[in-house]
Image (cartoon, rainbow, N blue to C red):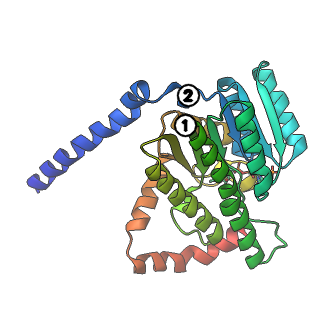
Amino acid sequence: MIAFVKWLFLLSFPCILCHLYWRFVRPLIFVPKWLKTPRVTLITGASSGLGYAMAIQYARISQILLLFGRDAARLGKLRMECLSISPTLEIELVECDTRNSVLIKERIHKFDEKYNGIDLVIANAGIASGPATLSFEQNARLVTEVNTIGTMNTVLPAIEAFERRGRGQLVLVASIAGLLGVPVFPFYSASKAGLIALAEGLRARLIRTQIRISVVVPGFMETPMIKGRRYIWTLSAPAAARRVIEGAARDDGMICFPRRMGVPIFFWRLLPNWAKDAVAFLIGQRLVEFVG
Ligand SMILES: NC(=O)c1ccc[n+]([C@@H]2O[C@H](COP(=O)([O-])OP(=O)(O)OC[C@H]3O[C@@H](n4cnc5c(N)ncnc54)[C@H](OP(=O)(O)O)[C@@H]3O)[C@@H](O)[C@H]2O)c1
């Protein structure tokens, strides 16, 4: 037993040192300035919730904001708020659905030319489900189109533009629901799991370049998406936006919050199949009925 504890201590010590280096020393010395204070920032899904809160906080950091959303009125209101924070800020509003690949590509390339590069692209637009009138299949297709194809429509031209300039940062907004299959929204879980894998793959592929990729894996956030419900450890949108901005500035590969939510998920993933099935049998259907 004592030998086991000794080994555990010996093994954990270098891990803790690496973590401290990564979190505190590396960002100070090795993370370039353009990652900490991006000059040009593009956000999709900026018209609401997390995207809106991030835009307001980037208004203090960036010089040019490119805000994509579907709702012109809310985008207009966001522009006014951002300008009240930073009157010299340049803001471009783009009213578009992320499923429109042609428009998104055209705009990203146009802004890349016009502003001599985009430093940061945050692919944040997403839905948990469609209108209640949709069937299970219609919902599944819509969620996949918006979260998977819509995000891909943003990712591909962004990477193309970054490759041309030789640098850039891409942040994908996934969800903790992508780390485990949620019975209420299985296709939402699948789409977000795909984004986590996509970000990990792209980061590994581009690790030797100046193109940085991160994925945000949030728990519950107080936004219109959760329709006024309060779940366990729900963060406000501004608090969540702060975590994203800090994580992106440190160039963290995975920006996961709240951290304590990671602990039950870690143990859930270690459970044997029979235990997962037993839990699903006891609460799976009840969860579906509760959330509706
Ligand atoms: N809230 C949570 O608890 C939670 C937890 C984990 C992850 N997330 C993720 O966080 C991201 C932001 O969500 P949120 O909580 O801020 O929800 P939200 O308030 O509903 O915002 C979603 C944003 O995405 C936009 N959007 C949705 N479908 C779109 C489409 N087809 N084309 C273009 N834009 C579209 C919305 O535009 P409109 O304003 O026009 O609808 C809105 O701006 C999403 O990717 C979501 O999956 C949320």
Q: What residue sits 69% from the left and 44% below the top? A: 50
Label 1 CA crowd tier, 10 Å (few <14, some 14–19, many 20+): some
User: Looking at the picture, how far across and down is residue 38, in whole percent?
Assistant: 61, 29
Q: Earlier in the sequence, mark 2 or mark 1?
A: 2
Q: Is residue 239 above or below residue 221?
A: above
- Residue 270 versus residue 165: which sits nearer the camera? 165
Image quadrant holding the C terminus, namely bottom right
Residue under label 2, please give it.
34
Numbered tag placed on residue 81 in the rendering:
none
Q: Which residue sits furthest left?
A: 3
Instruction: Tell me the element at label 1.
Output: strand
Labels 2, 1: front one = 1
What is the three-letter code of the residue carrying label 2?
Answer: Trp
Residue under label 1, please give it.
167
Label 2 CA crowd tier, 10 Å (few <14, some 14–19, many 20+): some
Instruction: Tell me the element at label 2.
Output: helix
User: Looking at the picture, how far across and down is residue 234, in whole percent?
Assistant: 62, 48
Q: Is residue 150 above or below residue 253?
A: below
What is the three-letter code of the residue carrying label 1?
Answer: Arg
Q: Quadrant of residue 17?
A: top left
Q: Is residue 23 above or below residue 103?
A: above
Q: What residue sits 53% from the left and 80% below the top? A: 281
Image quadrant holding the N terminus, namely bottom left
Q: Which residue sits furthest right?
A: 73
Q: Is residue 47 visible?
A: no
- Residue 112 versus residue 54: which sits nearer the camera? 112
